[in-house]
Image (cartoon, rainbow, N blue to C red):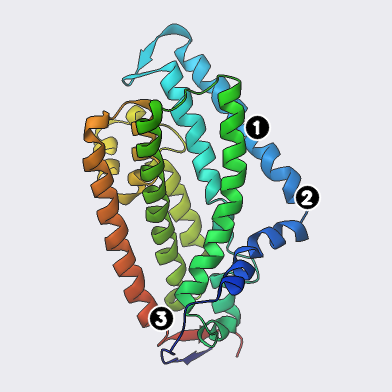
Amino acid sequence: MTAVPLSPTVTHAPRPHRSWRILRLGLLNERAYRVRLVVAPLTLAVQLYLYDRLWTAVFSHTTVAAGLTLRQTLTYSLMALLIARIRWNSRTFNVRDSLSVAVREGTVVYWFLRPISPSRFYMWRQSGDMAYGAFWAVIGYVVLLRVHIIAPPQGVSGATVFAASLLLGQMVLYYLGQIVDIAMFWLVSNSAIVRMYYFVQDLLSGVFVPLPFMPVLLLTFATWLPFSFGINVPLSLYVGRTPMGHAGRELALQALWVIALAVISRWLWSRAGRRVTVQGG
């Protein structure tokens, strides 16, 4: 095992056609493993159905729990699954062009020789995966709205606030995932950390269960961590648990987390170029 320091190189913004070539890598990976084109929507459909049955059973003897009605809980829970689907492909750490594989095999050196910076390539690559995941999420959302399982947004203003909060939330989760990936430059293998991170993220962001149903101590702890700003905050605004009068404060806190995490990830990228560990010589 050898350590190869790399000096930062002068890079330029990618041309539009180059950006498109990077964005479509996620879709090309899906086409290479075509069974996933069937498994992905099928898995999502099964998850949505099971969650619907679960919460319907929970509310069979009550109308309100944790300050939420059945309608609000179903909307929150099912939309949390859809939002989590946006970054589902980003969780794959064994894809050939992923950062983890590149560091492990030593091919990450080419990330520093391209006409765009490693961080910019990472951004476009992740954006492609998120766009593909968002495609399935939007389809699921439209279907659930049409069959009246989830509630619609609270008018145009509510939809606008939710869209802004959702965008900021995805940026928070993007930078958190990026920081975990960059840790590869020091850890060589971070598969265990990645699995633990995504479990914690789903638990504390509201994917497994809406945060209002958590014990008070855990809820207080979760609301001060960045994970909750990824999914819980947008959905709390959507279902009305957080009043629209508090939307400005919530959006401001999300923006602060985005800025803080962006600064941290930028600093880590600047350090990563000085240490590239190649496994296998």
What's under tag 3, amino acid-wise?
Ala
Corner quadrant of residue 223: top left
Quarter of image, res 130: bottom right
> Mark 1, residues whose alpha carbon is within 10 Å: few (<14), some, or many (≥20)?
few
35 left or right of 86 in image: right
* Residue that mark 3 sits on: 272
Disc 2: which residue: 35
Secondary structure state at the residue bearing disc 2: helix
Distance between the alpha carbons at the discs numbered 2 and 3: 36 Å
Instruction: Give the residue drawn at x 30%, y 42%.
Output: 222
Pick whichever, 34 or 215, lies toward us: 34
Horizontal arrangement in the rendering, residue 252 relative to residue 124 (left or right): left
Q: Tell me if I can see residue 189 in this picture.
A: no
Please state the horizontal and vertical placement of residue 57, each as a whole percent of the image. Answer: 52, 15
Give whichever of discs 1 and 2 has the lower sequence position. Answer: 2
Is 186 left, or right, of 216 in this rendering? right
Q: Tell me where residue 266 appears, x and y as whole percent.
A: 35, 73
Mark with earlier residue (2, 3): 2
Q: Residue at x 32, y 62 (%)?
A: 261
